[in-house]
Image: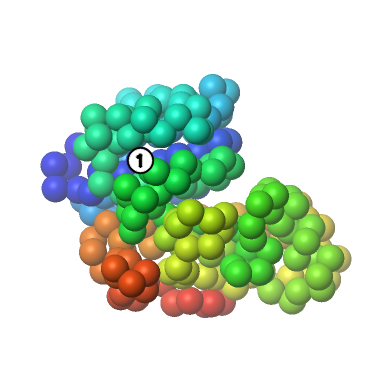
Amino acid sequence: MNEHATRIAVFASGNGSNLQAILDHFDGPAFGVAEVALVVSDKPTAGALDRARARDIPAHVVHHADAPAIERLLDALRIELVVLAGYLKFVPAEVVRAWHGRILNVHPALLPAFGGPGMYGLRVHAAVLAAGARTSGPTVHFVDEQYDHGPVIAQEQVPVLPGDTPQALAARVLEAEHRLYPRVIADVAAGRVRLSSRGEVIGASSPSLSSS
């Protein structure tokens, strides 16, 4: 462990491919900037927990609405930044308020389009295709008390191709998430990007709406 690295908690509900991309980034290009010090899931069977345990990273299952338990874990492990990576539950409002400007999320569409309650997984990509959109892609944003609503930090465009299925589009957007999210996390961890008291993003991360 690097004692000067920003201590990150990753919240994940699924396999943990974004967690793996984050781990790889801080093992390589951004070594020493941040480290994953905790993985939290709402599902005991989440693959993300296995990935964490394989690296001796503390891994805990916590009910998504148990704000006191979440805050105790974050405090006990001296977490400085919370990262939602495929976490399908709403973070309790009291946690969001306490961690204002220190919680990030990645959403698999270009917000503000195709976001909000119920918009997750293949539903997002099916909606993009049904709308006839020509581009999609991930959005990284600060978390507030509404679904997929906080200030946007960065986005990456992914073209919608003729004959695309939700599954095919999802796979390409996920690849873009794996590129974009770790870089943005590093920028926030290093202080290059932050949220002002007025709720404005200060600093620059990966170019917004860049082409993949």
Q: Considering the image in quadrants, where does the N terminus appear?
A: top left
Q: Residue at x 47, y 69 (%)?
A: 152
Q: Residue at x 23, y 64 (%)?
A: 191
Quarter of the image where one finds residue 128: bottom right
Left or right of 110 on screen, residue 41: left
Amino acid found under the numbered disc labelled 1: Ala
Q: Residue at x 73, y 58 (%)?
A: 125
The answer, for residue 186, to whether it is visible in the render is no
Quick check: 54 above or below 87?
Answer: above
Quick check: 165 above or below 81?
Answer: below
The outermost residue toward the left is: 3
In percent of width and height, residue 80 lies at 25, 46
In percent of width and height, residue 48 lies at 49, 33
Quarter of the image where one finds residue 176: bottom right
Quick check: 68 above or below 147?
Answer: above
The outermost residue toward the top is: 44
In percent of width and height, residue 175 lies at 57, 57
